Image (cartoon, rainbow, N blue to C red):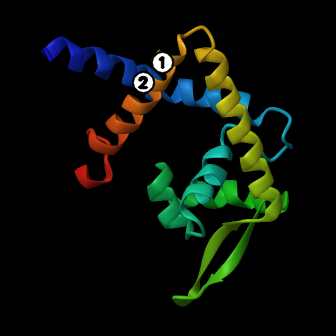
Amino acid sequence: MNNSTGHDIADALALLLRRSTRARLYTRLTDGLGEAVDDLTYPVLSGLARTGPRSAADLGREIGLDRTTVTRRADRLEHAGLIQRQPDPADGRATLLALTDDGRTVISATRQRLAAGIEDSLAGWPRDDAQDFARLLRRFVDQGPFAADHD
């Protein structure tokens, strides 16, 4: 593999990881799911869906936001009944954020929308190409520079 392949992949990833790209995607995923669910609060919901109950500080590290920002966004989501605060069994003074059943329903809807959008975008691809892309992308995520063991 030559050096330009790495640059081509890096350029494509830079486009995918741009804040504006994520905000546009989150807006499409959350459209019509309630006043509290938008491109700002979606990362909190999605992060909790991935990690399970977390403190605001721990969740912030996971999703790239500071504790204060997570707390403000969590307040909106709690008011809407999508997350709840619960005592941390490991530390009686601490509180964990956790999804409610309604929060899990919202996450299920956003994941269905995302999967459908991906399927639509791959509809014009030959089936084998789409399957190869999915397999190779998973391999890149699991073994590439973003893999957990590369931290």
Does residue 74 appear anywhere in the picture?
Answer: yes
Give the amino acid type for the residue marked by disc 2 in the picture. Asp
Q: Residue at x 57, y 54 (%)?
A: 47
Q: Residue at x 84, y 41 (%)?
A: 33
Question: For this view, does 119 lie left or right of residue 66?
Answer: right
Question: For this view, does 136 lie left or right of residue 89?
Answer: left
Secondary element at image label 2: helix
- Do the numbered discs 2 and 1 sit on residues whose CB atoms are within 8 Å? yes
| Location of residue 33 with respect to 92 vertically, above or below | above
Looking at this rendering, what residue extends furthest in the front direction?
128
The spot of residue 109 in percent (x, y) is: 77, 42
Q: Quadrant of residue 113?
A: top right
Looking at this rendering, what residue extends furthest in the left direction?
2
Looking at this rendering, what residue extends furthest in the bottom direction?
92
Secondary element at image label 1: helix
The spot of residue 67 in percent (x, y) is: 53, 61
Viewer-proximal residue, 44 or 67? 44
The spot of residue 98 in percent (x, y) is: 67, 68
Give the amino acid type for the residue marked by disc 1 in the picture. Asp
Question: For this view, does 111 lie left or right of residue 14?
Answer: right
Q: Give the residue pinned by disc 1.
A: 128
Q: Residue at x 80, y 47 (%)?
A: 36
| Location of residue 144 with respect to 70 vertically, above or below | above
Does residue 27 appear anywhere in the picture?
Answer: no
Viewer-proximal residue, 104 or 65? 104
Q: Give the residue pinned by disc 2.
A: 132
The spot of residue 116 in percent (x, y) is: 70, 28
Q: Quadrant of the N terminus?
A: top left
Q: Quadrant of residue 95?
A: bottom right
The CA span between labels 2 and 1 is: 6 Å
Q: Quadrant of residue 32?
A: top right
Numbered mark located on residue 76 in the image: none
